[in-house]
Image (cartoon, rainbow, N blue to C red):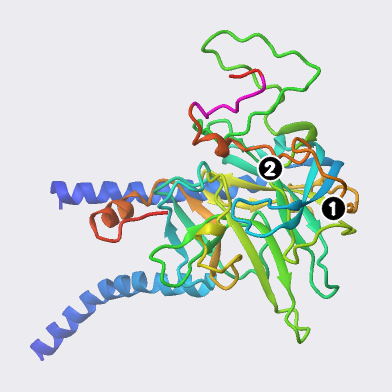
């Protein structure tokens, strides 16, 4: 009754029960943290090009490059159980046939880390606004974040992905909207996505959808810089010294 | 009389043990029933979804969705592959079947958060999208606890990959 094995077993069993209960309480406690996300999305420019947008494209198809402005405050999504927020902007566009529901495609995404999340190369670093000068940083000291966690203000942002349609044609598509979505990844518990309506203390997102717009006709030959995409942090992994995107002035 | 009583005694002593064992054995089918998924618990075995999921995390699936939206995390298991892929849906189209029923199919393109490009090269030859191979969406998450399972599988021939 008092042998070592039995004692170890009892301790382990008690530890497991307590850990399970603590994890359960943490997972459920997020619902009492009030949330009030807001977002405003504006279309800046959209171009439709005929070409090969993906590395595996073997035939030419029409694809769209959508530049946008994004202003959002998602700081209330971060609580004690938030490991990261996967933020994405999706384009919702109707199908070519009237009976099919609309298609959706993500054009931009960002990974916003929570306060205690261990550093990862893919964490989104907010670009500094173009008119502000960069603050001087001492060597070895991380520069302070420009905005508080969860606030994003982007102007004329290039997309990360170009969108295509299964029909291969995208020009002159009407009733296209850009919509913001997110996925809150907890330390333990349920993953939650953006809620449009109010769930108790969690208010639905205010704004978050752009005005409807149309995809234009294919213009003349588009300049390469105009329809370029922006590589995410995960795209710089394989380059030599590629943990930081290389700007025009070099590293 | 004596032997009958002792057999009864032994059986009634063993009953709690049987109840516990069968209770534990029932958990898995019950979980499959509640989540409507053939395989409701997985251990993450690749780094393709970092920093959301690291190797050794446990993910819980739910398969009662009517449709999948971009941003969801479907678990896609192509037949003949040893392991499924757990990636994010980045593109969703829907085709209503010709007879007009709305239970047509969704065409889904996935991409791992930690991958530079989408998964199209990993789909079977000729397939551009995923539809029927989704065995559930990731809805729950427990960190770190799956490491023992990864160690066990690394000793066997089917080592975890992708």
* Left or right of residue A160: residue B12: left
Measuring from the top left, give residue A107's x and y in whole percent. Answer: 72, 47
Chain at numbered mark 2: A
**Residue at the spot x=54%, y=70% of the render?**
B133
Measuring from the top left, give residue A116's x and y in whole percent. Answer: 53, 31
Q: Is residue B47 above or below residue B104?
A: above
In this rendered view, identify the residue nearer to me: A193 or A172. A172
**Residue at the spot x=24%, y=59% of the render?**
B156
- The residue labelled by disc 1 is A177
Q: Which mark is residue A160?
A: 2
In this rendered view, identify the residue nearer to me: A246 or B138. A246
Q: Is residue A215 above or below residue A103?
A: above
Q: Is residue A147 magenta?
A: no
Find the magenta span and give its range.
A241-248
In this rendering, which labeled residue sits more in front, label 1 or label 2?
2
Measuring from the top left, give residue A44's x and y in whole percent. Answer: 86, 39
Q: Is residue A247 magenta?
A: yes
In this rendered view, identify the residue nearer to me: A65 or A103. A65
Chain at numbered mark 1: A
């Amino acid at each position: 009754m008092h042998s070592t094995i039995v004692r170890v077993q009892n301790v382990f069993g008690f530890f497991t029960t307590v850990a399970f209960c603590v994890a359960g309480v943490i997972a459920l406690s997020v619902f009492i943290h009030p949330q009030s996300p807001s977002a405003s999305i504006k279309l800046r420019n959209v171009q439709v090009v005929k070409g090969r947008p993906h590395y595996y494209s073997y035939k030419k198809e029409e694809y769209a490059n959508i530049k946008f402005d994004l202003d959002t405050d998602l700081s209330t999504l971060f609580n004690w159980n938030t490991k990261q927020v996967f933020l994405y902007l999706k384009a919702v566009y109707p199908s070519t046939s009237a009976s099919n529901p609309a298609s959706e495609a993500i054009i931009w995404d960002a990974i916003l880390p929570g306060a205690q999340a261990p550093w990862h190369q893919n964490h989104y670093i907010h670009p500094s606004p173009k008119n502000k000068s960069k603050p001087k940083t001492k060597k070895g000291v991380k520069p302070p974040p420009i905005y508080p966690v969860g606030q994003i203000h982007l102007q004329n942002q290039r997309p990360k992905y170009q969108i295509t349609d299964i029909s291969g044609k995208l020009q002159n598509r009407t009733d296209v909207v850009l919509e913001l979505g997110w996925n809150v990844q907890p330390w333990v518990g349920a993953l939650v996505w953006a809620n449009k309506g109010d769930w108790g203390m969690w208010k639905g997102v205010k704004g978050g959808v752009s005005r409807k717009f149309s995809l234009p006709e294919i213009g003349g030959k588009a300049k390469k810089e105009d329809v370029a995409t922006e590589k995410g942090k995960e795209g710089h992994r394989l380059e030599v010294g590629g943990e930081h995107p290389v700007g025009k002035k070099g590293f | 009389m004596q032997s009958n009583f002792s057999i009864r005694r032994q059986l009634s002593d063993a009953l709690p043990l049987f109840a516990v064992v069968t209770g534990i054995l029932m958990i898995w089918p019950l979980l499959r029933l509640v989540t409507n998924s053939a395989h409701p618990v997985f251990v993450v075995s690749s780094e393709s979804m970092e920093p959301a999921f690291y190797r050794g995390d446990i993910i819980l699936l739910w398969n009662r969705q009517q449709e999948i939206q971009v941003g969801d995390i479907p678990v896609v298991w192509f037949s003949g592959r040893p392991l499924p892929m757990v990636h994010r849906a980045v593109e969703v189209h829907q085709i209503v079947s010709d007879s007009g029923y709305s239970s047509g199919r969704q065409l889904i393109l996935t991409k791992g958060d930690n991958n530079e490009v989408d998964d199209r090269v990993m789909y079977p030859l000729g397939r551009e999208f995923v539809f029927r191979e989704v065995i559930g969406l990731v809805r729950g998450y427990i960190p770190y606890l799956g490491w023992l399972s990864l160690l066990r599988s690394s000793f066997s021939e089917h080592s975890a990959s992708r």
